[in-house]
């Protein structure tokens, strides 16, 4: 139990660090041109600004402010598509780029523009920039050569575009299709090391606990059609292999066997605090298992296999690493299911009942890439 409390304390500590990172030393200028200094955070979604000073937190609406300063960055009010933002102007000209947050940017070229996120829209950014800068071939070449986009690269590309010798370039059909219909679904592949605690009951009167180990591979996808819930809801496809050691039972007849299980499952997960350093999640899935047995019953050796289905609720946490990689810790439970291995052996065809009920608690350490 003490390990659980330690883990919960670590999660809470990491979460507080992630929240604290949203606040920066800065100042707020209100409608009366009065300046309030403190720790400031801007929320462009709710159109509010939060200021911590002397242990007190105060909330301001955009309409009540003239501007905000975060460090050396000045955030002023701009309107785009009838929506108001507090944004830091990085480059102005024929094309303008604004920083809305550390990972959100607004790019405007004459009457066209778009807000995008460096993480969630990572795959779509080259298409967005190519269409916005479509009349400048040299900038489009730079875009195609750029592997990672950041505040500096976006500012540099916008500056280059504003100083370009423009031409009547029209994007190819392939480029337009890629930019407009590019699959913006979020994917996470992962590999896992798993430890398994197996609870096994034989013929309803002999039970035993055994341990197993295994490997897992999976794919988690958050489709773009989920809208604002993208990044919160993930569809998971898992493949795992669990190898269990000897299980000995003092039953009516001495029994000993090894069990290896190969499983497929499909499920849903809901991730909380999706942009934080630590993101807890809950999930549920439905799966298929093929269990292979190798052992002895009395003096008779047997090998058998059975297939079955199971439910698998799960809970865990994700720790956000650099470059959108994650470490995950998952605890899951495979609901009880039955494998009937009863058979007849020997010249007299003696009947040996062997009905095995299985349930599992699995702890997995995953790396998402």
Image (tube, helix red, strand yellow):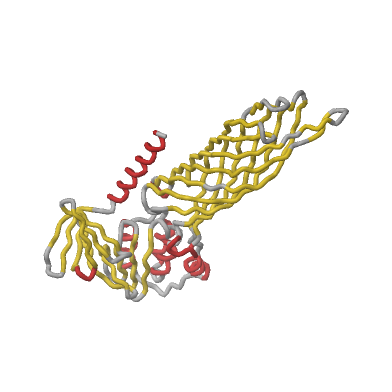
Image coordinates of residue 266 in percent, x first then y, are: 58, 52
Report x, y in % for residue 187: 50, 54
Which of 12/94 is in front?
Answer: 12
Name the residue rendered at 54%, 39% in the picture: 362
Residue found at the very far top of the displayed protein: 299
The answer to whether residue 258 is above or below residue 228 is above
Q: Quadrant of residue 56?
A: bottom left
Residue 327 falls in image quadrant: top left
Rendering quarter of residue 133: bottom left
- Camera-side residue of 179 and 246: 246
Considering the image in quadrants, where does the N terminus appear? Answer: top left
Across the whole image, how many numbered discs are drawn on residues? 0
Q: Residue furthest front?
A: 205
Q: In this view, does 136 lie to the left or right of 284?
A: left
- Does residue 329 appear to the left or right of 61 in the view shown? right
Q: Is residue 156 above or below residue 194?
A: below
Where in the figure is residue 325, as x and y percent of width and height?
43, 47
Residue 265 falls left or right of residue 29: right
Residue found 41% across the figure and 60% down from its top: 143
The answer to whether residue 207 is above or below residue 179 is above
Q: Which of 64 and 346 is in front in this view?
A: 346
Q: Is residue 89 left or right of residue 295?
A: left
């Amino acid at each position: 139990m003490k390990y659980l409390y330690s883990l919960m304390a670590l999660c809470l500590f990491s979460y507080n660090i992630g929240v604290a990172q949203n606040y920066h030393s800065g100042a707020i200028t209100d409608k009366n041109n009065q300046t309030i200094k403190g720790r400031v955070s801007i929320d462009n979604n709710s159109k509010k600004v939060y200021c911590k000073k002397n242990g007190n937190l105060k909330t301001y609406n955009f309409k009540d402010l003239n501007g905000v300063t975060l460090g050396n960055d000045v955030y002023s009010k701009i309107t785009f598509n009838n929506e108001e933002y507090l944004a830091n102007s990085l480059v102005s000209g024929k094309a303008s780029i604004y920083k809305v947050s550390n990972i959100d940017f607004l790019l405007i070229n004459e009457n066209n523009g778009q807000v995008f996120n460096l993480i969630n829209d990572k795959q779509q950014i080259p298409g967005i920039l190519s269409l916005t800068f479509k009349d400048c071939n040299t900038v489009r070449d730079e875009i195609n050569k750029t592997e990672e986009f950041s505040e500096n690269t976006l500012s540099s590309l916008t500056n280059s575009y504003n100083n370009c010798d423009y031409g009547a370039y029209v994007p190819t059909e392939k480029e337009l299709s890629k930019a407009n219909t590019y699959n913006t679904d979020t994917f996470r592949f992962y590999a896992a090391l798993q430890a398994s605690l197996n609870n096994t009951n034989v013929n309803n009167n002999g039970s035993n606990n055994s341990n197993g180990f295994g490997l897992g591979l999976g794919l988690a996808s958050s489709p773009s059609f989920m809208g604002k819930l993208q990044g919160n809801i993930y569809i998971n496809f898992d493949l795992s292999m669990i190898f269990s050691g000897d299980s000995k039972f003092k039953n009516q007849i001495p029994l000993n066997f090894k069990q290896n299980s190969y499983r497929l499952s499909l499920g849903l997960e809901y991730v909380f605090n999706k942009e934080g350093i630590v993101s807890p999640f809950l999930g549920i899935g439905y799966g298929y298992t093929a269990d292979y047995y190798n052992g002895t019953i009395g003096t008779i050796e047997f090998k058998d296999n059975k297939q079955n289905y199971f439910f698998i609720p799960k809970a865990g946490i994700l720790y956000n690493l650099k470059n959108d990689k994650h470490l995950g810790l998952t605890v899951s439970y495979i609901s009880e299911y039955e494998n009937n291995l009863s058979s007849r052996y020997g010249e007299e065809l003696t009947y040996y009942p062997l009905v095995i009920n299985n349930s599992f608690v699995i702890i997995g350490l995953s790396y998402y890439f």
